[in-house]
Amino acid sequence: MKFNVLTLFPEMIEQGINTSITGRAIKEGYISLNAVNIRDYTNEKHGHVDDYPYGGGAGMVMQAQPVYDAYKSIVGEEELKKEKEMRKRVVFLTPAGKTFNQRMAEEFAKEEEITFLCGHYEGIDERVLELIVTDNVSIGDYVLTGGELPAMVMMDAISRLVPGVLGNGDSSVDESFNAVNNMLEYPQYTRPEEFMGMKVPEVLLSGHHKNIENWRREQSLERTRIRRPDLLD
Ligand code: 6GU
């Protein structure tokens, strides 16, 4: 999986992704990261990438030209001659997008290359979005200062679904929201058997696999009922 990120803060993306499991996945070649600084593509001598909004209003708007040229530097002229439907996916991170979820992560994980476009200020000139963006995605109903954290959230969720990224010790099978059951994960325990007077549930020490499986399913269901009843509808 190849990730490109168009951003004004490439170091933020690199620091975040070159860490932990995604960092290991890059070292081992399962994923790659190319963070491109939009500011490097401005034609303005003072390095501006934003300007006042036509029609007035608060804040600044990112200009189309540097975003377009940064994108072109990644995909090349040939890609832009194709119909948008035939191009590799370009995800614009925006609170006005479709809300990201595990189903979408599974779909994106099938791609071989994804480009993320991170906005700042009050937004990006609509014309460049019209030209290059294939998907508008939000990570939830709250407002952040920019698209960098959302892009990192998406890359993390997608990466761990790429074959080889999770080692043998890690698993994406029993977790919450997998494709098989849309339920929250059951509680986990490790040594010691007693902590602050609290004991590990007896059934987990029994070695009785069928009973353990049943207990975990009940716990998942109960937890989902209490915390996320919307998932059971
Ligand atoms: Cl993708 N961007 C921003 N700025 N805020 C958000 C978001 C994205 N998703 C949720 N809030």
Image: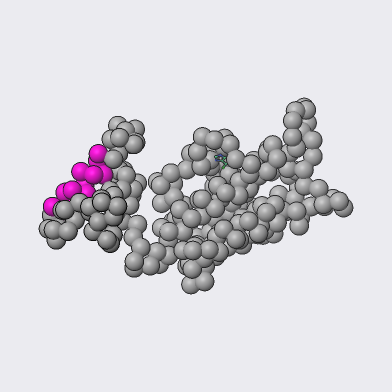
The reply to whether residue 187 is in sight is: yes
Q: Is residue 72 visible?
A: no
Report the quarter where the C terminus lies.
top left
Q: Is residue 61 magenta?
A: no
Residue 79 percent coordinates (x, y) = 62, 56
Q: Which residues are magenta?
A: 211-222
Decide: is 225 above or below 168.
above
Q: Work out whether residue 212 or residue 176 is closer to the camera in this orientation and state it.
A: 212
Residue pictured at 55% horizontal, 41% vertical: 136
Q: Residue at x 53, y 63 (%)?
A: 19
Q: Residue furthest right?
A: 45
Q: Is residue 143 left or right of residue 229?
A: right
**Residue drawn at (16%, 53%) of the image:** 202
Closest to the observer, 216 or 38: 216
Q: Is residue 7 above or below residue 218?
A: below
Image coordinates for residue 88, horizontal then vertical, percent? 55, 54
Residue found at x 24% / y 40%: 221
